[in-house]
Image: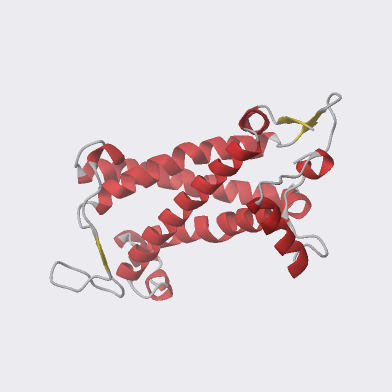
Amino acid sequence: MDSALPKPGSVLRHSLPVRLWHWLNAVLLYVLFTSGLGIFNAHPRLYWGQYGANFDHPWLKLERFGSWFTLPAHYNLAMARHWHLTAAPVFAFALLGYMMWGLFGHHIRRDLAFRRGELAPRHVWQDIRDHARLRFPTGEAALRYNVLQKASYIGVIFILLPLAILTGLTMSPGMNAAWPWLVDLFGGRQSARSIHFITAFALVAFFLVHMLMVLLAGPVNEIRSIVTGRKKS
């Protein structure tokens, strides 16, 4: 986020790397989630530990997701794996690149780091109340991320997305041979699969809340800012 004023009443809200990563992620997460459901449909049960098969007791048992909700739009495990494993490395390296840019380009320190007093209980509670009452910041305050935005973005970028990548790697037999410590880290391949599933739906929940906030805050201005980078102040 920049504070440069290209013209009266308009500010540069999102830099080009932020916008590119945002839209790339939108496509990749769609491909990964829908193809992941296609893979999950092959065995729609989740277990904890090292093993899980038809005669084991799952902690979660679901029906297959509808074909219209998966990629491809019919049951095809090989094709779903192809889509998933094609998008996954692009997603992982894009996240790594974004993290490196955010660190060395000072985006993290400037825009996402919490300022003094922002984590004070009274400040956090006030932000929660303002969101619950649909009172969104205006003017100069609207050009900065509030404490709830910072917490959610930090949680997604530094916890959920890396967790999705690492648990995905843990399920790969090749990675088990190269990095056997991953299996121990997550308590087994089936535990990693369960965490991967939970993380995927946590990201979907974040996306739905994110879209709701965009609609409530003014979709035209918000979408303009993530497309052109500029937002009316």
Report x, y in % for residue 20: 60, 35
| Residue under the image location 51 percent in, 41 percent down | 25
Please provide percent x and percent y for residue 181.
Answer: 42, 73
Q: Which residue is at a point 65% across and 34% down the rendered structure image?
A: 218
Q: Is residue 133 visible?
A: yes
Residue nearest the observer in this picture, 90 or 69: 69
Residue 50, picture quadrant = bottom left
Camera sees residue 70: no
Q: Position of residue 176 (x, y in %)?
A: 34, 66
The C terminus: image quadrant: top right
Residue beneath the point at 67% across and 56% down: 148
Q: Is residue 138 above or below residue 202?
A: above
Q: For the view shown, which residue lies furthest in the left direction?
A: 55
**Number of marks in picture:** 0
- Residue 153 percent coordinates (x, y): 62, 53
- Nearest to the observer: residue 143 or residue 101: 143
